[in-house]
């Protein structure tokens, strides 16, 4: 920012080459607002153009070099000064010299490694951005462009169910079961609660999803818990031998994949909390960690009519209906 | 690989035993505080309440019991539970010391409406406490609810199920 109107000043603009075709996703900013950013995956090339526009045409601009950087960094809110950069790439666009007219520079960061997912949390932020800088004697001119990175996984080879018997001796024994231990973000938690012994007066039962963001190391570890969802699964008093089904659709909740010890700086983990509440508002709970992962979207091409029907389960879905309609159209 | 839709069919459950489904529940516990009676004369009067308990919980020795207790017995119970157990013990209805001052227009602590208020509060207190799994392990609670008299010089101990 220049306060003096003499001399030359410039505006920088960063434009991606595939801005027309690349998908944009919503991402929460630090102050809670939602904005759209270009979506990138690990290994993708980041290429585009840097437009440098001189504010006063005709006047020359001296500079100490123009460069563009691709940066991936972790920022802990309690330690704002220190940015931990885990990806730092730079391309020089212009050697020190003079600019007499507005110019455009091409850049390409080939097959950039983006090992972690973009994350904006309560106490930590992980972001990726491009930063174009014109170095000058008195003050630099720079422009940042944030992008969002998603990390994709495939169906885990091993995905055992969670089944456990818990309780308070002689008062309450239950057996809970969740069909998987690893769920993708649009998955459904299917489970059941089986009552083995009920000597207390239960009023209702709910299942909560808790997100725990952990920052810091050693004695300075800080956990921030946030209840993402509360879902009542039973209203009333159960007796021995009763089974209560659970069916919780995760797509309705804003969640991120499980992030474990990211660059040794922070973790984001998710827990299912089963809560039973008795007539006197006493709470009995059992917490169990689940792993969340992000599944890639697969573009479905044409599909035979039979295959479309076979792919439909008990619950219909928009994509299955679309496939059925598409298959019908194709066969006509 | 085609995009699969999640299988949301219920997990397998064993059928419930019919006697479990239609039989009496295992959590039956009913406590009533009733029949306030003022005994004694003059300045040595006090009110006792009948505490009737009905249950099928195995932790209680008697499935039906009936005892008489006064307010100071409740205070004793609350103190014992606070000290001996990790339970957050609910409050008792007020001690109402101001009602024991002289020159009142009404009957003080022997006023009908006050006794009724206190009776309700004591009943709520007992129902809250007696249903607490940790309080149920305390000897003092069982002595208060089911023994003829409260022996304040007892030895505190934990009850374990037979």
Image (tube, rainbow, N blue to C red):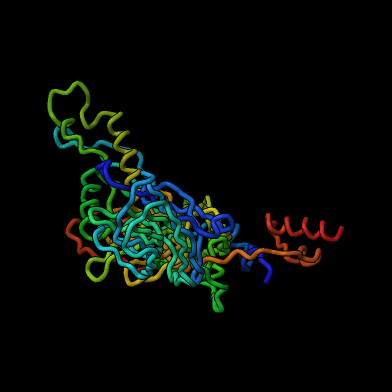
Is the N terminus of chain B in the top left, top right, bottom left or bottom right quadrant?
A: bottom right
Q: Is residue A244 visible?
A: no
Counting from the top left corner in percent of width and height, residue A184 is at: 54, 65
Asked whether, in this view, residue B1 is left or right of residue B93, the answer is right
Identified at 49% across, 64% down, the residue is: A47
Identified at 29% across, 29% down, the residue is: B112
Q: Is residue A115 above or below residue A322?
A: below
Counting from the top left corner in percent of width and height, residue A269 is at: 41, 65
Most foreground residue, A98 or A164: A98
Q: Quadrant of residue A133?
A: bottom left
Most foreground residue, A46 or B83: A46
Most foreground residue, A324 or B38: A324
Identified at 39% across, 57% down, the residue is: A120
Is the C terminus of chain B in the top left, top right, bottom left or bottom right quadrant?
A: bottom left
| Residue found at the very far top of the displayed protein | B105
Q: Is residue A332 above or below residue B94?
A: below
Count of marks overlaid on the render: 0
Q: Is residue A50 above or below residue A115?
A: above
| Residue found at the very far bottom of the displayed protein | A157
Counting from the top left corner in percent of width and height, residue B146 is at: 33, 55
Counting from the top left corner in percent of width and height, residue A217 is at: 26, 69
Most foreground residue, A235 or A159: A159
Q: Quadrant of residue A140?
A: bottom left
Asked whether, in this view, residue B13 is left or right of residue A167, the answer is right
Q: Is residue B45 above or below residue A86?
A: above
Identified at 26% across, 59% down, the residue is: B86
């Amino acid at each position: 920012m220049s306060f003096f109107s003499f001399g030359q000043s410039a505006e920088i603009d960063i434009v991606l080459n595939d801005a027309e075709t690349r998908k944009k996703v919503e991402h929460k900013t630090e102050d809670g607002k939602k904005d759209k950013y270009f979506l990138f995956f690990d290994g993708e090339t980041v290429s585009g153009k840097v437009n440098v526009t001189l504010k006063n045409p005709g006047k020359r601009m001296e500079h100490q070099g123009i460069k563009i950087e691709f940066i991936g960094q972790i920022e802990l809110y309690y330690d704002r000064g220190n940015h931990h950069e885990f990806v730092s790439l730079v391309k020089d666009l212009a050697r020190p010299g003079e600019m007499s007219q507005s110019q455009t520079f091409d850049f390409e960061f080939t097959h950039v490694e983006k090992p972690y997912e973009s994350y904006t949390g309560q106490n930590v932020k992980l972001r990726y951005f491009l930063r174009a800088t014109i170095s000058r004697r008195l003050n630099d001119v720079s422009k940042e462009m944030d992008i969002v990175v998603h990390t994709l996984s495939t169906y885990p080879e091993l995905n055992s169910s969670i089944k456990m018997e818990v309780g308070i001796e002689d008062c309450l024994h239950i057996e809970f079961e969740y069909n998987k231990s690893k769920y993708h973000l649009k998955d459904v938690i299917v489970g059941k609660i089986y009552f083995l012994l009920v000597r207390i007066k239960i009023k209702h039962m709910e299942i909560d999803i808790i997100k725990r963001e952990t920052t810091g190391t050693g004695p300075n570890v800080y956990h921030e818990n946030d209840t993402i969802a509360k879902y009542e699964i039973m209203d009333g008093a159960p007796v021995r031998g009763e089974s209560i089904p659970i069916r919780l659709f995760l797509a309705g909740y804003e969640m991120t994949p499980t992030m474990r010890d990211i660059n040794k700086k922070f973790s984001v983990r998710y827990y299912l909390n089963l809560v039973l509440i008795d007539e006197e508002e006493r709470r009995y709970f059992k917490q169990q960690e689940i792993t969340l992962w992000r599944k890639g979207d697969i573009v479905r091409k044409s599909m035979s009519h039979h295959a479309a029907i076979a792919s439909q389960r008990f619950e219909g879905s928009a994509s299955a209906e679309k496939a059925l309609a598409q298959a019908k159209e194709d066969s006509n | 690989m085609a995009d699969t839709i999640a299988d949301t069919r219920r997990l397998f459950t064993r059928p419930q035993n019919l006697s479990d489904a239609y039989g009496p529940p295992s959590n039956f516990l009913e406590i009533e505080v009733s029949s306030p009676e003022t005994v004694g004369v003059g300045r040595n009067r006090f009110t006792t309440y009948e505490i009737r308990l009905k249950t099928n919980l195995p932790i209680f020795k008697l499935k039906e019991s009936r005892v008489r207790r006064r307010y100071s017995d409740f205070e004793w119970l609350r103190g014992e539970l606070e000290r001996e157990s990790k339970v957050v013990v609910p409050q008792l209805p007020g001690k109402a010391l101001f009602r024991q001052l002289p020159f009142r227009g009404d009957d003080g602590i022997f006023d009908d409406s006050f006794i009724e208020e206190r009776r309700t509060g004591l009943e709520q207190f007992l129902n809250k406490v007696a249903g607490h799994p940790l309080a149920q392990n305390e000897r003092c609670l069982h002595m208060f609810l089911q023994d003829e008299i409260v022996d304040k010089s007892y030895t505190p101990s934990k009850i374990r199920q037979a």
